[in-house]
C-alpha cells in the first residue's frame, strides 16, 4: 500500500464525472490496490472519506471511515470502514439539515451546506457484493459529500450562504460551539 497525492480544488479531475466500475475491473489487482491506497491516504490525512477523483482516478469508488476522536471531525459518530463502489443515493424524505463541512481537496476552508437527513445508499463492496443501507444525520451527510465528488461536485458548490465560509482556525474560534451543539441534537434525534 502507498499513500497517494490528494489533488486540490482547481485540478480539473475534481470536476469530472467518474465512470462506473465493472465487476471485472473491480476485482483487478490495479483497482484493489487503488482501494488500499485510498484507505491509507484517507487515514493518513484524518479524513472522514475520500473519493477516487481526489487521488486523480475517475472511477466511482469512495472510502469512508470515522474512528472515535477523529481530530478533524471529533463530533461525528463513528463509521466503520466502508468501501463503496458505484454508489447510488435516494433520499427517504424531504428533510434537509444544515451541516458544516470541510474537504481534504479544499484546504483550510469550511462552510454550511444543506444535506438530506435520511438516505438509502446502494453500493457494491470491494468484493462486488451488493449492499443497501439507510444512513441518517451527519453520517448521511458524509456519504452525500463523497458521492458528490464522483459527480465532480465539491461542497463549496453547495454552500448557499458564502458568508458561512471560514478557515479551520476561525471555525474553532467563532462557529465550533454552535455547530457541535446543533450536530449533537441532530444525531440525538435521527441517529446515524
Ligand atoms: Ni471531500
Image (cartoon, helix red, strand yellow):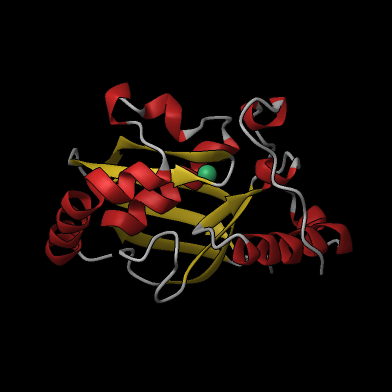
Q: Quadrant of the N terminus?
A: bottom right
Furthest toward the right, the residue is 29
Q: Position of residue 20 (x, y in %)?
A: 68, 42
The relative height of residue 40 versus residue 123 in the rendered view (above or below) is below
Give the number of callouts.
0
Residue occupying image coordinates x 41% and y 46%:
168
Nearest the eye: 74 or 80: 74
Name which quarter of the figure residue 112 lies in. Answer: top left
On the question of residue 89 being in view, the answer is no
Q: Position of residue 26 (x, y in %)?
A: 76, 58
Q: Position of residue 185 (x, y in %)?
A: 12, 59
The relative height of residue 172 versus residue 38 in the rendered view (above or below) is above
Q: Quadrant of the C terminus?
A: bottom left
- Taking the image as shown, residue 54 lies to the left or right of residue 104, namely right
Residue occupying image coordinates x 26% and y 55%:
137
- Taking the image as shown, residue 6 lies to the left or right of residue 106, namely right
The relative height of residue 99 versus residue 66 in the rendered view (above or below) is above
Nearest the eye: 108 or 121: 108
Residue occupying image coordinates x 28% and y 24%:
163
Q: Position of residue 12 (x, y in %)?
A: 70, 25
Residue occupying image coordinates x 19% and y 54%:
177
- Taking the image as shown, residue 110 lies to the left or right of residue 1, namely left
On the question of residue 25 being in view, the answer is yes
Amino acid at each position: 500500500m502507498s499513500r497517494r497525492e490528494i489533488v486540490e480544488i482547481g485540478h480539473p479531475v475534481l470536476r469530472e464525472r467518474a465512470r462506473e466500475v465493472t465487476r471485472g475491473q473491480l476485482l483487478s489487482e490495479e483497482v484493489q490496490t487503488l482501494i488500499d491506497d485510498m484507505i491509507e491516504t484517507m487515514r493518513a490525512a484524518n479524513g472522514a472519506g475520500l473519493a477516487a477523483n481526489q487521488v486523480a482516478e475517475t472511477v466511482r469508488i469512495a472510502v469512508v471511515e470515522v474512528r472515535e476522536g477523529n481530530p478533524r471531525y471529533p463530533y461525528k459518530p463513528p463509521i466503520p470502514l466502508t468501501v463503496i463502489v458505484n454508489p447510488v443515493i435516494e433520499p427517504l424524505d424531504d428533510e434537509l439539515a444544515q451541516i458544516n463541512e470541510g474537504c481534504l481537496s479544499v484546504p483550510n476552508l469550511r462552510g454550511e451546506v444543506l444535506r438530506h437527513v435520511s438516505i438509502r445508499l446502494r453500493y457494491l463492496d470491494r468484493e462486488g457484493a451488493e449492499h443497501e443501507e439507510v444512513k441518517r444525520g451527519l453520517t448521511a451527510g458524509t456519504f452525500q459529500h463523497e458521492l458528490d465528488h464522483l459527480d465532480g461536485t465539491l461542497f463549496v458548490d453547495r454552500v448557499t450562504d458564502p458568508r458561512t465560509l471560514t478557515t479551520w482556525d476561525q471555525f474553532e474560534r467563532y462557529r465550533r460551539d454552535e455547530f457541535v451543539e446543533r450536530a449533537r441534537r441532530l444525531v440525538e434525534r435521527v441517529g446515524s
